[in-house]
Each structure stands twice: as C-alpha cells, then as structure tokens.
Image (cartoon, helix red, strand yellow):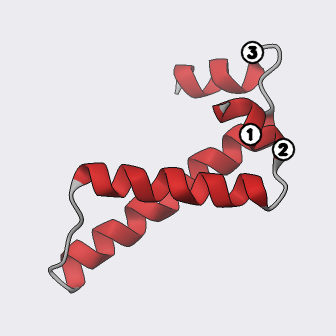
Amino acid sequence: MDWCIKMTTAPGTPCKAFHSLVLLVAWEVWKERNSRTFRHLGLPTLTLFAKIKDKVSTWIMAGTTRLAQLVG
C-alpha cells in the first residue's frame, strides 16, 4: 500500500495514468486467471507480459499520452 501511495503522490507522476496502468494489468491477470481456472488453458508468464505490453502500446496509440510518459 505504501508503494502505491508513493507512486500516486510523487511529483511528476501522472496519477490517472498510474491508475489506468494498474487497472490494465489487473484486468489482463484476471482474464488469464479465468482462462486457467475455467478453460484449463494458460499462457506462459513471458507471453502474458508481452500481451500486457501490447495492450499498453495500444492504449498509448489510442491517445493516452500520460500513460506514455509513465511507462516511457
């Protein structure tokens, strides 16, 4: 919890972008968890990381400039 508070209150950290990134990662991990639990299909960890990075890139191309600053 302390880490999250530090990240959202640090000077220069775009708060909305940080929250968007957290939600994006949580959503992808949740979908992977459901896939493993209900369909017995799971991605390798590095593939899941690549999928998350691809989603972040897609969001950045869609215009979330502050997210680009955060992960830049």
Mark closer to the observer (2, 3): 2
Q: Considering depth in this image, is 57 or 27 the residue closer to the camera?
A: 57
Q: Secondary structure at mark 3?
A: loop
The quadrant of the image that shows the C terminus is top right
Give the image location of residue 31, x and y in percent. 40, 71
Q: Is residue 47 left or right of residue 41?
A: right
**How much space separates mark 1 and mark 2, taking CA atoms?**
5 Å
Among the 4 quarters of the image, the one containing residue 47: bottom left
Q: Amino acid at mark 1?
A: Ala
N-terminal-most mark, 2 or 3: 3
Q: Which residue is mark 3?
A: 10
Disc 3 residue crowd, few under 14, some 14–19, many 20+, Cα 10 Å: few
**How much space separates mark 1 and mark 3, taking CA atoms?**
17 Å
Q: Which residue is mark 1?
A: 68
The outermost residue toward the bottom is 39
- Residue at the image position 70 percent from the left and 31 percent from the top: 70
Q: Which mark is residue 19?
A: none
Q: Amino acid at mark 3?
A: Ala
N-terminal-most mark, 1 or 3: 3
Mark 1 and mark 2 residues within 8 Å of each other at the beta carbon: yes
Q: Which residue is mark 2?
A: 65
Q: Is residue 71 left or right of residue 60?
A: left
Q: Considering depth in this image, is 3 or 60 the residue closer to the camera?
A: 60
